Amino acid sequence: MQTGRLINRIVFQQKTKEKDELGQITEKWNDVITLWGAITDQTGREFNSSQTEQSVSNCTITVRKYKNVLITPDMRACHNGIIYDIKAVLTNEKQTHLQLPCQKGVRYD
């Protein structure tokens, strides 16, 4: 992949559990790292759920692979207010980039 194609600033977040002021445990998404990447839409579909029409798109996010950065499927990616649910983390043959198959459109908080 050419470096010039990594034109999107993508924020990777991980869900953590914290105690609020009442001592209740709450889950919150916290920013882990921001990387340059490329987002490529693959397919999309519409469906009915709870009597409402919804859509979901499959896409792939490509980022450089760093030794000190660990991206896992339990994280999510955010770009321009859109949340991407990471389904897997794949490496290319040269071990220089990560391919992240994702879904956007349906939120699973």
Image: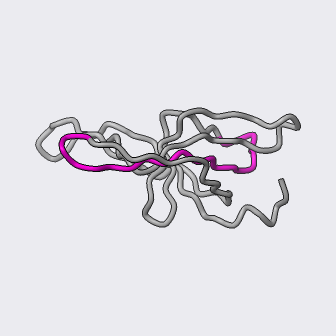
Q: Which residues are magenta?
A: 49-69
In the rendered structure, the answer to whether residue 92 lies left or right of residue 55 reads right
Residue at 50% across, 48% down:
44
Residue 60 location (% of width, % of height)? 63, 47
User: Where on the picture, by quarter, is residue 89?
Assistant: top right
- Residue 39 lies in quadrant: bottom right
Q: Position of residue 90 (x, y in %)?
A: 70, 34
Q: Residue furthest left?
A: 22
Instruction: Identify which residue, 15 or 55, lies in the foreground.
Output: 55
| Secondary structure mostly seen in the magenta stretch | strand
**Left or right, 50 with reference to 54:** left
The colour mode here is: one colour
Q: Which residue corresponds to the image point at 69% horizontal and 42% vertical from the top-left? A: 99
Q: Nearer the viewer, residue 42 or 74?
A: 42
Q: Nearer the viewer, residue 106 or 72?
A: 106
Per the image, is 61 magenta?
A: yes
Left or right: residue 4 compared with residue 54: right
Q: Position of residue 31 (x, y in %)?
A: 47, 52
Count up the numbered dots. Answer: 0
Q: Residue at x 74, y 44 (%)?
A: 66
Q: Residue at x 83, y 53 (%)?
A: 1
Q: Is residue 74 above or below residue 41?
A: above
**Quarter placement of the C terminus:** top left
Q: Is residue 54 above or below residue 23?
A: below
Is 56 on the left or on the right of 88, as rendered? left
Q: Position of residue 80 (x, y in %)?
A: 48, 66
